Structures are given as C-alpha cells and as structure tokens.
Amino acid sequence: MTATSFVPFADLSIQWREIRERALPDLERLFEASAFCLGPWVTEFETRIASLLGARHAVAVSSGSAALHLAVLAAGIGPGDRVLVPAHSFIGTLWGVIYAGATPVFCDVEPDTGTIDIADAERRIGAGAKAIIPVHLYGQPADMAAVRRFAQRRGLIVIEDVAQAIGASYEGKALGTHGAFGCFSFYPGKNLGGAGEGGLVITDDDGAAASLKMLREHGQAERYVHAHVGFNYRMDGIQGLILNHKLDHLARWTDERRAIAARYDSAFRELPLRLPRARHGDHVFHLYVVRTERRDALRTALDAAGIQTGLHYPVPLHRQPCLKQWATGQDAFPVAEDFAGMGLSLPIFAGMSSGQQDRVITAVRHFFGSQDPLR
Ligand SMILES: *Cc1c(COP(=O)(O)O)cnc(C)c1O
C-alpha cells in the first residue's frame, strides 16, 4: 500500500490547516496574557455555545466525562439513587454515576438507532430511580419524546449525553436542550474537537449553573472559601481558543459529514448491510456505523485495502469487567450485543476527499461481490 492510497479513519490535521492562519496569532495573545485556565477565550466559547444551542448557561470543563460527572452532582444524585443508562455506549457516559455513588441501571437499545430503548427501560427501572442519561449515539438523537414522557411519569431528571452529537437537533431544537442538562465532549476526534481534552454542560437552571461553576473550580463560592467538596475540572484556555476557531467551521464540517454519509447510503443500499437509520431527528454522523454478521472479515478486507475502520463499541457496558457488580443477574441485552458484535465504523471526517470516499465504497462493494457503481 502506498502512503497516498491509505485511507485513515480520521485526519484532524485538515482542521488545523483550516484554522491555522487565524489561530496562531491568537495563541500568541493567549500566551502573552497567560490565560491558561478558563479565562477570556473559554468565556467567549461558553457564550457562543449557549447562544448557538439556545441554552441559558454553558459551563466549560476539562472533559466530557467531567461534564457528565458534574451534571450528575448538580442534579443531586447520590448514593442509593438509580440512574438509567444505555448498555451500548462509551463508558464515559456513566463514570459520573459511579463517582457519585449511585447505581447505573443498564437498558437495552433500539435496533435501528442503538439509542436507549424506553420500553426496555420501563421493564428495568425498579424503585429509587432518579435520572436517565439518553446518549445521542453516533450523532443522532435518542427518542426524546419517549424519554420525556417516561421521565415525566416517573419523575426522572434527564441528563443528555451529547458527546457525539453537537449540532444535531430533535423537533427543531438542539440536542442538549431537551433535558435538565446537556453534556458535550471536545475530545479531539469528536465533531468539534480541541487540541486536547475538553467538555461542557448546558442548562437553563440558574442555580444548577452556579453549582456547576463552583464544582469545576475546587468547590469555591468565593475565593479561598470552599463551600463544597469540588474538583479541578476547569477547561484550559488553549482549548477555549482552538474551539472558538473550529466553531466557525462546524456547520460546514457537519454538512460535509452528511454528504459523505449520503454517498455511502446510496452506494451500499443493496448490499447485505444494515445502514445507519436516524429515526428521531437529524444525524450529524460523528460515526457512520454499518452492521453485518461478517464484521470481522469486512474489517480485515478493508484493512488489507489500506482502509482504517473503528469499533464503537465491541464490549457493551454490562460486560465491562469493572461494571460487573451492576450487571450481574440482569436480563440479556440482545440489541446491545448485536451492535457490539456486528457494528463497523467506516471512515468519515471533514475534509475526506472524494477519492478517499471512492476507495471505501469500492472496497466495501467488492467485499460483498458487487461492482464499483461509480464507473
Ligand atoms: C467521548 C464520549 C464521552 C466522554 O467524553 P471525554 O471527553 O472523552 O471524557 C462520553 N460519552 C460519549 C457517548 C462519548 O462519545
């Protein structure tokens, strides 16, 4: 394989080249100002994100996992509380639940979307449930109407995990604004990614926003006075700066992801593959995940053709060694197992060339014995 024909799973250097010219002098200013922890660039980012998404408050933190942890704490969740989470997600979804001493209750996911299945949640909820964390997996919304009805009936707080779905919406309203809290990650590979770790919580609740700000900064209500046991979860100034520059391009980058997904959809339509199907709203294609019983063979064939793929996620949460105590004795999770065993993430990223897309399409079609549809 020559270097030029290799198709990476993602290429973040393209984003850097798009912001470089404007970001470099700005970085110079940041270093001159020593604005390393929070500071004006982070504040500007919070203001822009809040207005873009339509939230009253945005609180920037050090990672998506930190965002979820603080949202769980600001929601008043603690020992003895049960929190419903999908069995199929990244593990960062539920660290905060465990850090808070609460009990994660795994729920199966929907066959089309891989997002939390409320009918299954209904069966597993038990007594003492306090919150639910729907995950907008792969960049598409969970069934928020079902989540809302369920949460209202059961008195649950809704904490949205929007780590993979910034910019997607449900019923015309940004994801993250449907629950009490919306939690975002700016891990470099996410649709909006920093130059390191980052995260953010949005909320419309003034009191919760004040708690989040206090908790991210050592629990201090005023300087040197620590009202609560807090954390050092501040966002770095550099992340605020880089994210501001990348935010200028996010809408276009999302359009590019959608266009690539549309090409894949039509090229793979008649193959024996289950394609992504966003049933509940628009999809921003953080990941393009196909499912096939021949997943491992397809992955090997693509690898041999110089095409990098990913698995999101091959071991469901209820089978993670460190989560065993909350999973034993539970009914099976057949749909989560189906995604874990059959899902394959194909390359999709802003700036992916049409030649790279062609190569993925050709290789996938050839694997299934189809001819290239392009020529
Ligand atoms: C990335 C991610 C997280 C955690 O974010 P970090 O910034 O990596 O801590 C949580 N949930 C989901 C679904 C994610 O994809």
Image: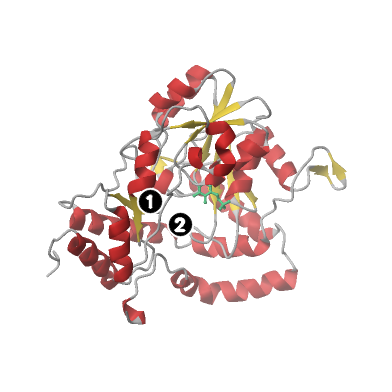
Which residue corresponds to the image point at 34% horizontal and 61% vertical from the top-left?
A: 256
What residue is shown with label 1?
Answer: 284
- Sequence order check, earlier mark of 2 and 1: 2
Query: Residue 191 has which mark?
Result: 2
Residue type highlighted by circle 1: Val
Q: Which image quarter holds the C terminus? A: bottom left
Q: Position of residue 94 (x, y in %)?
A: 57, 40
Which residue corresponds to the image point at 73% horizontal and 73% vertical from the top-left?
A: 32
Residue 221 visible in image = yes
Tell me if label 2 and label 1 are in contact, CB under 8 Å: yes
Q: CA distance from mark 2 to mark 1?
A: 8 Å
Residue 57 visible in image = no
Which residue corresponds to the image point at 45% horizontal and 57% vertical from the top-left?
A: 191
Q: Position of residue 164 (x, y in %)?
A: 46, 49
Residue type highlighted by circle 2: Asn
Q: Which image quarter holds the N terminus? A: bottom left
Which residue corresponds to the image point at 53% horizontal and 45% vertical from the top-left?
A: 91
* Horizontal relation, residue 294 to residue 123: left or right: left
Disc 2 on helix, strand or loop? loop
Q: Position of residue 28 (x, y in %)?
A: 66, 75
Toward the right, the furthest residue is: 224
Crowding around mark 1 (Cα neighbors within 10 Å: few <14, some 14 to 19, many 20+) is: many
